[in-house]
Image (cartoon, rainbow, N blue to C red):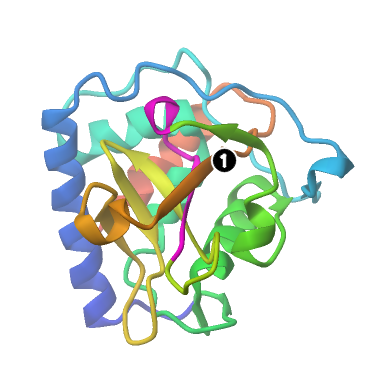
Amino acid sequence: MQPLTLTQTCARAAAGMLIGLLMTTTSGAFADEVSSSSQNANSGIFFSSKSSDAASAGAASNPGGAKSFLSGVASKAGDVVVGALNMIGVRYRWGGNTPDSGLDCSGFVRYVFQDTLGMTLPRRAEEMSRVGEKVTVADLKPGDLVFFNTMRRSFSHVGIYIGDNKFVHSPSTGSTIRVDDMEDGYWEKRFQGARRIENAPVGDGSELRQRVSASIGGY
């Protein structure tokens, strides 16, 4: 991947401050764990040999700031949330499939799941809305997919939920991947549902915690 631009670096620094704020205001936001099981071929998900370990269910996070928040998220939702946060600042590009070329909303979600868990999701947001398990707003957990109607078409936009009513997504032409609040008026009235994509079987979490620490080294 090419070196981060100044814009991407600033965007990630801002995201780091937001994450630290979220951690201080939502100490219990991640008490529940995402269940771990593999989807079969009928779910629309396919596993590649590149799957990586998610964090253990009982992994304890270290105290303090953004690192504590990200470690806590990682121990519950696996690599997906950390991978999504690492994409903050990448530019939007309609039809884009890689960070170097730019990513649209579904390309971003698909890339994160493929890169972190070895899962190949459908390419379009509307197709993703039929994969996994349907969940209510009250049951949302970090790593769930959230869907919106932004083009006068059902399930035309998708992002990755990170907790405290926040989600990461690639919004539109001229913007970059960022964190937004689902309770913001624009997103609240366009919200259409959420799905839970089951994680790959969990490991002991040690490798993931090392990657979490490395991923926030520039914050």
Q: Percent from the top left, x then y, of residue 209?
A: 42, 33
**Depth order, front residue of 151/158:** 151
Q: Quadrant of residue 23?
A: top left
Q: Is residue 22 visible?
A: yes
Give the secondary structure at mark 1.
strand
Instruction: Name the image quarter holding the C terminus.
Output: bottom left
Tally of numbered discs: 1
The residue furthest right is: 41
Q: Is residue 133 magenta?
A: no
Residue sitting at 37 percent across and 71 percent down? Answer: 171
Picture coordinates of residue 3 (x, y %)?
38, 79
Viewer-proximal residue, 97 or 100?
Answer: 97
Occupied quadrant, residue 11: bottom left
- Residue 15's place in the image compared with 209, above or below, is below
**Residue marked by disc 1:** 195
Left or right: residue 154 versus residue 119 is left
Residue at left 51%, top 17%? 57
Q: Is residue 56 above or below residue 8?
A: above
Q: Start and end of the magenta stretch?
A: 137-149
Name the image quarter holding residue 165. top left
The amino acid pointed to by label 1 is Arg
Q: Residue at x 50, y 28 (%)?
A: 206
Work out whether 119 lies above or below 60.
below
